[in-house]
Structure formats: structure tokens, C-alpha cells
Image (cartoon, rainbow, N blue to C red):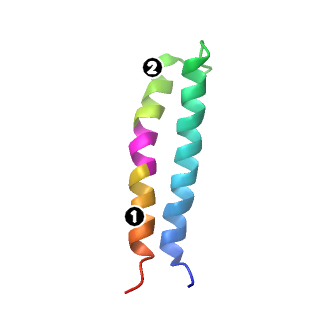
Amino acid sequence: MPMNPLAGLFLALACVLGIAATGSVFELAYGDPDLGVNLTRLILGLSLPGTALSLLVAIRLNKPA
């Protein structure tokens, strides 16, 4: 089954946001984040729900009719 191009974009966005969330967790866990604590928390707070939402949108866009 071929993938809808828009679903592929949302899947790529979910991957990038997941990487950002993982990096933010490690930065906060190991002490002094490079971007500062507040900005790293903001990135984590926005990337976690963004990852889930992007993944769900990608799945729904690619469901067969």
C-alpha cells in the first residue's frame, strides 16, 4: 500500500519531534542544559504532545478508505 505524501510529512515531523523530546529529557537529566533549563523544558513540553499528535494524524491520513 503506497503512503500518502501528506502522511509521510506528518510521520517525518513526528520523528523530528520525538528526537527533540528525547534530547531534552537527557539534557535535563544530566544537569546543565546547553540552551538553559526553561527553554529545554519548553521544547520538551511542546515536543511530547506534538509527537503524539503528528503520529496520530499520519496514521489517520494513511488509513485505507
Reading the image, the residue beneath label 1 is 57
**Which image quadrant is residue 8 in?**
bottom right
Q: Is residue 35 visible?
A: no
Kindly identify the residue that appears in the image at 57 percent across and 59 percent down.
12
Above or below, 23 against 32 in this view is below
In the rendered image, residue 5, in percent from the top left (x then y), is placed at 53, 76
Q: Label 2: state its secondary structure.
A: helix
Left or right for 35, reference 57:
right
- Please name which of the two marks, 2 or 1, marks the residue nearer to the observer: 1
Marking on residue 38: 2
In the rendered image, residue 49, in percent from the top left (x then y), is placed at 38, 44
Kindly identify the residue that appears in the image at 37 percent across and 87 percent down.
65
For label 1, the crowd category at 10 Å Cα-Cα, with few meaning under 14, some 14 to 19 and many 20 or more, is some
Alpha-carbon span between mark 2 and mark 1: 29 Å
In the rendered image, residue 29, in percent from the top left (x then y), is placed at 56, 19
Magenta run includes residue 47: yes
Q: Is residue 7 visible?
A: yes
For label 2, the crowd category at 10 Å Cα-Cα, with few meaning under 14, some 14 to 19 and many 20 or more, is few
- Amino acid type, residue under disc 2 in the picture: Asn
Residue furthest top as drawn: 31
Kindly identify the residue that appears in the image at 38 percent across and 70 percent down.
60
Tell me which segment is drawn in magenta: 46-51
- Amino acid type, residue under disc 1 in the picture: Val
Above or below, 44 against 36 in this view is below
Kindly identify the residue that appears in the image at 57 percent across and 83 percent down.
2
In the rendered image, residue 6, in percent from the top left (x then y), is placed at 48, 72
Magenta run includes residue 49: yes
Above or below, 56 against 33 in this view is below
Q: Label 1: state its secondary structure.
A: helix
Marking on residue 3: none
**Which image quadrant is residue 28 in?**
top right
